[in-house]
Image (tube, coloured by chain):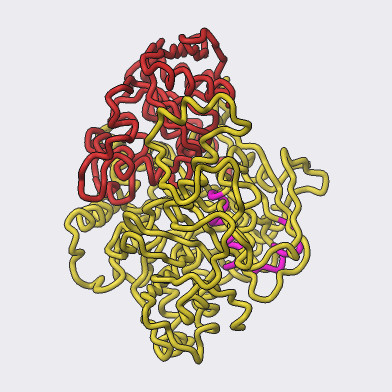
Amino acid sequence: MRTLFDKIWDAHVVQVVKDGPTQLYIDRLYCHEVTSPQAFEGIRSRGLKCFRPERIVCMPDHNTPTHDQDKPIADPVSAKQVATLEKNARDFGLKHFGMMTPDNGIIHVVGPEKGLSLPGMTIVCGDSHTSTHGALGAVAFGIGTSEVEMVMASQCILQQKPKTMRITVNGTLQQGVTAKDVALYLMAQLTTSGATGYFVEYAGDVISALTMEGRLTLCNLSIEMGARGGMIAPDQVTFDYVKGKEYAPKGADWDKAVAYWQTLRSDDDAVFDKELTFDAKDIEPRITYGTNPGMGIGITEAIPKASPSPSKGEDVKLHNTDNTCKSSGNQTSPPSEGLGEARALSYMGFKAGEKLLGKQVDYVFLGACTNGRIEDFRAFASLVKGRRKADHVVAWLVPGSWAVDRQIREEGLDRVLEASGFEIRQPGCSACLAMNDDKVPAGKLCLATSNRNFEGRQGPGSRTILCSPLTAAAAAVTGVITDPRTLL
Amino acid sequence: MKQKFDIIISTGVPLPLENVDTDQIIPARFLKATTKEEKFFGDNLFRDWRYNSDGTVVEDFVLNNPRYGGCILVAGKNFGSGSSREHAAWAIAGYGFRVVISSFFADIHKNNELNNFVLPVQVSEDFLQELFASIGADPKAEVKIDLPQQTVTNLSTGRSEHFDINGYKKHCLMNGLDDIDFLVANQDKTEEWEKKKTLP
């Protein structure tokens, strides 16, 4: 009567601390350059080594430029952070996939594609989108830098066992509706905190029918509902994906592993702390309209009219705490909620009740650990094929890894994209969080396949709408927000 | 860092916005440091809400309002959502906050605060709104945080609530200990466990 999550978690418990957390063994720690330097600094100052260096894999991805990677990084601070990771990996004897090496890319793209992330594993990284790896049937979650240091020092982490939630999506997805749309739909239903405190298992016809890459996209976005992680029971789709990967088990070890992985499913009588069920027929291509990923609508829908809402068009200031505090007593819902909604619309330049179809788009971003895989490039290319990029749109197409880049060229997608006026950049996190030069200018509207539309996420003052690769492609060729189903 | 915790009485800085994400607490462009420069992170806490793009001060943002101060940040529901960046906790600590009160915290950020000796105190929505009202009416309104008793008290109204924290973490905060000390001391248990493990 155990859930998939319970089975993997229980198999990794070293001990349960009295009146405290669980000491959990970690099979794989990934490190990128942004959230690891202070952890290395920490173990160094304590005079410690990495306890199990063979379980740690490092690669730079956040700061990497998406052009001229063979030249030194222009920003000296970024360059130093990338160089620091390389030095730390060398000093502590860790595997390191450096920039411009064939294995480099975004950690959450590279891990699965190399077979470094496997079913049944516990996987952590100082990055909230570590939830991605749960698609393989692993317990994978993002952690802070102190926790990265814990794992370096002991290959263990202290964690409270989260609650479990199962989200079942039944039915069949309509044409033009992707895993990304399912995730954006779920976020809007649950809000950004709806799954906080839970580990989510996705199940149902829709999930079973998803490709491995679709599953990676879905699990990637679990954190945007607040969930620590998301996971999917490994099945034939998983085994077919993992088989033959560089670091996957081979020969007799493979057979043994698959036999074990087949036991990794929630028992029929497993009890979840929470169960939610949705139907695929309710899901159309989705876009966000606000400044958190839960503020989303179907692409043909209008922005909901929230209440209470300060007067329309007025620049709402959260800074004015005086007023908000004084008015807090006699409203039915907390004033901050209305304030947040109005502030978000003000930031985005949208009005409650309006539709977004037909709005002019300035930038399009295809990429990130959410949608930077080969299937995403295939989807984008299939829609733009035979069409031209709108002149006023700046399009950034950023593969999630060099392996994805090689596959793009092998399949001739590069020629399709170039014929339509698009160029392919070099791999990295890029405009998802704009730590490199790929910054959307203040006030510009970007349709992005990434994971977050927070204020300033793609650069100070940038305005982000999250969507699928198909919806991004439709915007790129029409220059306005367009229902991709009209172009299929 | 590692400042022992006991009882704190302070005024609070109110930020009554919900879903404050860690990108707002510290924007990505300030994450490039390779050492734990708490002052640098603290100086850039809520950077894009505190300063205009030309570097001038946003006068009416609460951190720039001289009426409010103290080592307690009082924030709306679902504080610290989004990115796992511990830089957000370093920024909060670096600015001088020792406690954050909210009616709900995002998981990863909550752990990050605890690991930096910043105490996240989760209260009921009703308690939170009353506290916003108290501070709104009088910025000198004080809050008492009693970690040994696990209580938070709005000293303006006298209303008190119990808050949760596990016994292990409470012991760590009160004695200035961290998880790495514990895990390194328990490496023999880890080695024992590894010997028994067969897969993967």
Q: Is residue A54 above or below residue B81?
A: below
Is residue A237 left or right of B87 when viewed as pictured? right
User: Is A206 part of what is drawn in magenta?
Assistant: yes
Q: Which chain is yellow?
A: A
Colour for chain B in the figure: red
Front in this rendered view, residue A152 or A212: A212
Q: Quadrant of residue A425?
A: bottom left
Total marks drawn? 0
Q: Is residue A289 visible?
A: yes
**Magenta region, mostly helix, strand or loop?**
helix
Q: Residue at x 46, y 46 (%)?
A: A343
Locate the C terminus of chain A and report the quarter of the image it occupies.
bottom right
Residue B117: x and y in percent read 38, 24
User: Is A26 part of what is drawn in magenta?
Assistant: no
Is residue B142 left or right of B53 when viewed as pictured? right
Q: Is residue A386 above or below residue B57?
A: below
Tell me the magenta residue range.
A203-224
Q: Is residue A23 above or below residue A178?
A: above
Is residue B47 left or right of A407 when viewed as pictured? left
Q: Residue at x 33, y 42 (%)?
A: B49
Is residue A270 left or right of A391 when viewed as pictured? right
Q: Residue at x 42, y 34 (%)?
A: B112
Residue A479: x and y in percent read 45, 77
